[in-house]
Amino acid sequence: MSQSRIRLLAGLGVEGDAHLGRTVKHRSRVAADPTQPNLRQVHLIHGELHDELREAGFIVSPGQMGENITTRGIDLLALPTGTRLYIGETAEVEITGLRNPCDQLDRLQPGLMAAVLGRDEQGQLIRKAGIMGIVIAGGDVKPGDPIRIGLPTEPYRPLERV
């Protein structure tokens, strides 16, 4: 479900989102330790995943898989942990890790969770359901806003699930 804008709030996440807050909001994480920092304030998915899913017979549009921001032309999954995304005029998001897809995707469409998982040549699990981040600087984000990438200092740390 595409929106005309979302508002990112520094240190909290997306205004009005279920995951808004400084500490974890996901039920399983709250049950484990409700004081954990919320590393999942913003969920980004590459629009190319929607294309791939459509080719596999799924009907998925931006926002349906819980993402707050859909990108194009950025290999989100290849970015290292700590990358900063400067979005629009003022928003800044620091990438914390990979989204770990859950079975809620299968409630949207049966088989969707398996479709966003894969294996590499070594048999390692590949999570394709997007990346998560925290809001460093707030601001409004609108469709078509430019995104500038700021890589962290080397050595880069690969993304892991958060």
Image: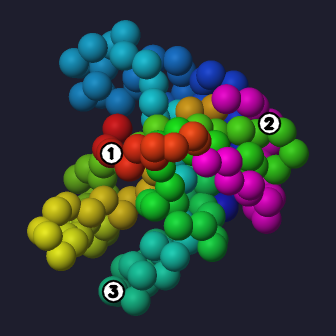
Q: Residue at x 27, y 63 (%)?
A: 126
Identify the amino acid type marked 3: Ala
Q: Residues within 10 Å of mark 3 (few under 14, many from 20)?
A: few
Name the amino acid, label 2.
Gly
The answer to the question of whether label 1 and label 2 lie on touching residues, with beta carbons closer than 8 A, is no
The tag earlier along the polypeptide, 1 or 3, is 3
Instruction: Classify the position of the N terminus by image quarter.
Output: bottom right
Contact (Cβ within 8 Å) of mark 2 with mark 3: no
**In the structure shown, which secondary structural element does the residue marked by tag 1 occupy?**
loop
Reading the image, the residue beneath label 2 is 139
- Give how far across and how far down residue 55 sits, in percent: 40, 89
Read off the magenta span.
136-151
* Mark identifier at residue 160: 1
Residue closer to the observer: 56 or 78: 78
Residue positioned most to the top = 35
Q: Is residue 146 magenta?
A: yes
Q: Amino acid at mark 1?
A: Glu
Indicate the quadrant containing the C terminus: top left, top right, bottom left or bottom right: top left
Q: Which mark is residue 137?
A: none
Residue 1 visible at all: no
Asked if residue 41 is among those painted magenta in the image, a careful observer would answer no
Query: What residue is rendered at 63% in x and 32% in y?
Result: 135
Q: Residues within 10 Å of mark 2 (few under 14, many from 20)?
A: some
Circle 3 residue: 56
Residue 117 placement: quadrant: bottom left
